[in-house]
Image (cartoon, rainbow, N blue to C red):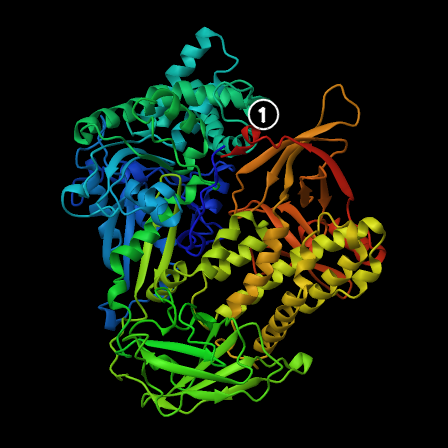
Amino acid sequence: MARIIEKTLWVEAVQPEVIDGQKYIPTALCYTENDGLVFGSKAMALREGGRVVNSEFKVALGEVVSGGSKENRREFEVDVGEPRNAYNLAKDYFDNVLKHVEDRFPRSEATNYKHPAKIIVAEPLSFQMDGYSPRWVSNYRDNIRRILDRYEEVEFLPEPFAVFQYYRYGCRVPILQDASKHVAFIVDFGGGTFDACVIESTNKGDISLSGKSSKPLAADSVPVGGFVVNREIATFLIKLNLDNGKRKEADRYIAQYQRVLIGELKLEDLGVKNRSFIENYKKLEASAEGFKIELSSKISNWRLDSDAYEKVMVDVPADPFASSGFVKIEFYAHQLRTVFVNEVWNKKLKKTISNVLDRSSEALNDREISVTLISGGSSNLKWLQELLVKDFSDQLENAEPVPISHSFQEVVANGLAIECARRYYDTDSEFVAVTYNPIKLFLNPDDTGLVKDKKFRSVGEKIDMGKAGPADLVPSAQSLKHFFESELQWKIKLSKSPKHHLDYYFSRPDSDDDLDSYNVEEVRVNTRDSKHFDSAITVQIVVREDGTVTPKFIYKVANAEFGAEENSVTGRSFHIDMTADANEIKSGDHFVGFDFGTSNSSLCVLDSNKIKVTTRRQQSSAWSGLSACISQLPFPVAFAVRNFLGTTQARDIPVAAREAFESCLAFMAYTAASEASLSGPIDKLMRGFQHRSMGPLKAMLESSLKIVGSKARFSSGFGDLFSPENSVKLNKAVYDFNEHKHDKLGERDADWQEYVELVVRVCSKAMENKLFGYSAECSSVPFSVDSYEGLFKVANDNAPFIKSFAYTSGQSVSDSYALLYDKSSGEALCLSPFIFWFHRMHTSAPHGCFWLDKREDGVAIVKPCDEKTSIKSSEVHTSLSHVFDALYDNGVLLSGPIAVDFALDEDTSRDF
């Protein structure tokens, strides 16, 4: 398997909005009598009860002509009320989804009653197919502009363009990083449409929206997506056990159903047998999405010639032509593959791709396609990649698909967010030249020579150091008005501590030899305490409105917890080149990227501050390092770290940092405690643990590691947190977080990123040879005693989790167990009930991860790792009360180490 492509901060820090527990909101509506309009997953749930749920209206939206006659508008039956056309349905859906974010940029008289936000909506690139209007795209845009007329600006971006932006700026794909032309073949296989195109970038590697390179070299789009796959699955299953005569009859009724869908026939006009068949077919089609995803998650090998005997149990009608109930049958992966290859690929997709590649050949003029980029939730059926390589090897010989280690579903939404940032935000005009000369700082400790080759790091990331070179303190003209009278700090590591004196020159960047120093009246401070130094010197300045600056050099940062006093010296104030003039962008500027899909939709919301901070952090190795770790971190930790990366408001950063810090500590503490339980009951350990907060977690981790000692396997590496170098930082972090929590420390008074980086670095390094996850399924091996086989789902990064391994074990493994697998020993440690998995409804991660939060009045309180609300353990499942009583009272976990044999060969692992 090709190496994993690393995601950048534009993906990790800009995640789709969570609305009613979902990042990818089903494009569905149900008009009810009592609850009014219900949308998303709640609407889809009503379909199982026989209610009329409206979906798949996106394609029909392009057929609605503004101001046209009613006859030109196909109407959809609804559960309650008069039929509605696609425009009405789309408007209700847009309004209900967007109302969850519009309070951030409200309308008012001052905004001419428009939402002060710009919105980009994804659209199919081209849409030319028999039976559809040649003005489909134009109608689609006109209707959406009418729906969103309350917005400041409404724009559109072809979905493949969003895909390109995602891969170029959201992932570190080597071939796309150089500033040169690229020819990319892009396929976007979503819930309702399939787009294919060939795009040539500009000389700088970007897509231009004007000029010769503004249009794809060739493109095609057809209304084939996940809903068609579901329909073909339903067709296969309903005809599975019918003889030839009955199969022909079934085909006739399916054709009638298609005519009902487009309004040519009315269901009530058909015979009883016809209606019974169609009702059975509709139920099977509605359930296909669920078991398609379930079966896909079990497939361990996507090769076209591999054995594919993974299976799910599905309900099919006992008699397709009568209302006789449903029976359960097995549906195998090789059957799904047959349906996909024969009915979807061969009959629908292959021709579209061939057309695009053939049409692009002339424009390419013998140039080769250099990369293939894939997106869309339906692309998670990775036979698509195999078939591209197999059937188009000549055209795509040097352009194999770029692999990603996460779901393709997120690609367009994140690509839209990136385009929002690039299209609407002028980074050149963002920073205002209030300091009209940059500031360098040259240091000379004890006459050892000027330090010219080292860089300063801004504490708390207050100053943009993205383009800073050696000796740059304020690297370019920037506004300092927001920092008047506050303490701006930088850190720098010197090769020698200034034990006697320190010469310093705050200088204009004219030359190194002839220092044009601001602080001409005093250039030296004498050291008072030559014994106490941190590994890095802290340089501090306080800027005042009149342009005067007071410097301070902190050799040792105070630590009240350990009685350490600050060792510092203060220099004389001096004046810098600064103007009070400031012309800043409005803080209220908002940008919305809306991926309106046939099956699922999602949206990303950015504001000017988030774009500014994310852009700056993307250029920082420290922040990029945190981002790079996420794909290897266990989900409970990765979720909190990602949330921290996405937090850009200064007031919120310490809180998000503390949550990320505590999540790392919790995972390490719970793992170490679980391993300590292998040596005997840990009831004494549990008596001192009452809450999942920094102090108790640190104590639990330290005590557990002492119990485990040199035998540590699963918690091996966690001890690095208590090394002499890290221990001081750890204690300082805990102290500063607590001080901030009790309003004794400001949000800008500590380097919160450094504290998160400390625990993440230790945790991610310790996880290098381990896998966190759960058993997605486990069943006994036929004709074998005490032998089980299952699928281990690797739960790193973010849901949905796409990597899994087949395994065998001598014991049954519950899907509620949180497991940490050690590759070197071949054993998995059960972390439950400290951490456990359990099913949830209407969430982006339906198999939810929970962990122990605290115990109050003898009741264990647990918390979903990706939610803020804590709940009683008994509300998840009644038996959990007894499980936690056993943990606290007897020090017993659910299970010890589990010997498992993983199929860790990369060819047998699966990503979907």
Q: Is residue 25 left or right of residue 313?
A: left
State the residue position of label 1: 310
Q: Residue at x 24, y 76 (%)?
A: 583
Q: Is residue 538 left or right of residue 27?
A: right
Viewer-nearest residue: 714 or 577: 577
- The image position of residue 796, as x and y in percent, is 56, 46
Q: Amino acid at mark 1?
A: Glu
* Quarter holding residue 809: top right
- In this rendering, is residue 495 above or below 594? below
Q: Give the crowd class for mark 1: few <14, some 14-19, many >=20 residues within 10 Å.
A: some
- In the picture as drawn, the residue positioned furthest to the left comes out as 211
* Quarter holding residue 772: top right
Q: Is residue 526 visible?
A: yes
- The image position of residue 502, as x and y in percent, is 48, 83
Q: Is residue 661 left or right of residue 59?
A: right
Viewer-nearest residue: 207 or 3: 3
Q: How many marks?
A: 1
- In this rendering, is residue 824 above or below 355? below
- The image position of residue 752, as x and y in percent, is 52, 69
Q: Residue at x 41, y 41 (%)?
A: 79
- Element at label 1: loop
Q: Is residue 275 visible?
A: no
- In this rendering, is residue 529 above or below 332? below
Viewer-nearest residue: 190 or 558: 558
- The image position of residue 374, as x and y in percent, is 37, 36
